[in-house]
Amino acid sequence: MTEGDDGDPLYPNRDGQRGGRPVSRRRLLAGSASAGAAVTAGCSGDSTDGGGTTDTPDDTESHAATDTDPGESVAADTVFVFNTGDGTVTVIDTATDSVVGTRHLDLTASFPSNQFTPRIASDPGAPLWLNVDRGVRALSAGHLADLARVETGTGANWQELTPDGSHLIVSARGSHAQVRVDADPASETFGEVTAEIDRSDEGGRGDEDGPGPCDVTVHPDGEYAYVPDLYGDTLTVVDIAAFEIETQVPVDPVADGGGGAAAPWMATAAWDGDRLLVEHSEGESGTESIWDTSDPATPVELTRLTAADGLGRRPLTSEIGPDSTTGYVFTPGSNDVTVVDLEGEGVRERIDLGGSAYAGTWGPDREKLYVPVRSNDEVAVVNHATGAITARLDVGARPYGATAARVRPPVDGERSALTALASMGVDASPAETSYCIGECACGHRLDES
């Protein structure tokens, strides 16, 4: 799918290797390693079917770097932009809105954990959790070194930290599971699965064999996680401590087309805990719902916004402003960001990006929104106070996911050869794949043929 394409933006997530329990494996970086060891073929940007995946054996170490890291991390507010087209990460200084450098990795990420990470990742060893290959993976914020890996049995994963950073909650869509991981680096069980919910017995729409939990966002009190179920047409509330389903709310369709499915697939909880935004892949152009979560365990839908209300095409993900009254919905089908008034329950305006963006992240101070514009190889910086784009920064090829931290890894002078080759489109070091929605599948075979 290309930018502005009106076709179905959802790639089926069946890879023929689903099933089984998630397997947790902790991996520590033990120095330099050759690129491409035990990883899959890299993303090619526009690929929609790049072949199968290769699991890393239990006795094989996985590495995020191919060169020894000679520098030291520094305390500085930083945004990380993952460029799925060349397997690099671009590091941005949020104080000056300038690119510090670009570093080549053996992985890429489309939907990294970014709800609470920007504020709690202040130590060099703090984990950045990424969706990669057939699970999730943690790199240290200060050195981008491997910390942990959890396999989920599917290539389509979304994850989010709890506000205190103690748990990582994963929605594994293809294996129809919710997984809780110990995310505290100081814990003896860091990187291990501590609980899971097999949801396959719920079934799904049509011939789907489960509800397809797609995305996860955490209420700021840290007690509940919200999961939109793409194939179940439900919004599921998970009790994080007990790790069981607290509530499941049916979601009815409002748009014509789409086989009568509401198809909720992404969600974002407001910082004050009173509102929730949910994106829907329903109808011809998608819809957006606003929910009341003032009683966190029992969310209530307030309204559903459509194109008739001014919503942009194909809402995919969203972020909520620091005032908890403004929603920013990434609508790649119309190459813009739709700004939503959460109190007035309507569309306020649309910010023209000049290209397609699928996700974004706040800087650690939540004053500016950093939006990777995938089709333009740049990041647009949106100032929340003014609602205007204040900077456009050149990054690597096909930027997709982004997150932030209060610590910065060394990047100057590192991997100059690999980074230069990547910038020229030379696949010198294969990157572990990441599941994308829209435009690319980043190496995953997403059908069962």
Image (cartoon, grey):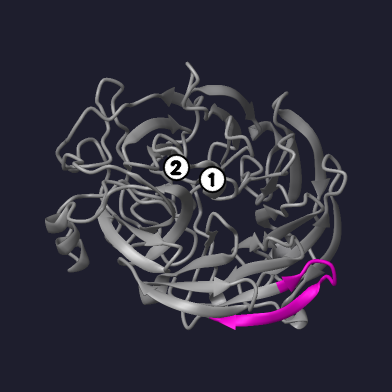
SS under mark 1? helix
Q: Is residue 273 left or right of residue 322?
A: right
Task: Please tell me which residue is depicted at 16% across the width and 42% down the height of the picture.
Answer: 67
Q: Is residue 252 left or right of residue 278?
A: right
17 in relation to 197, above or below: below
Provide the major secondary structure of the magenta segment.
strand
In the rendered structure, which amino acid carries the disc numbered 1? Thr
Kindly indicate the quadrant of the structure image that contains residue 37. Answer: top left
Task: Please tell me which residue is depicted at 67% across the width and 54% down the height of the picture.
Answer: 267
**Which residue is identified by label 1?**
117
Q: Are marks 2 and 1 in contact (CB under 8 Å)?
A: yes
- Please state the extent of the stretch shown in magenta in the rendering: 340-352
Q: Horizontal and vertical percent for residue 165? A: 57, 35
Q: Nearer the viewer, residue 442 or 388?
A: 388
Determine the residue located farthest toward the top in the rendered image.
Answer: 188
Asked if residue 47 is among those painted magenta in the image, a careful observer would answer: no
**Which residue is identified by label 2?**
128
Please report whichever mark, 2 or 1, sits nearer to the chain's N-terminal start: 1
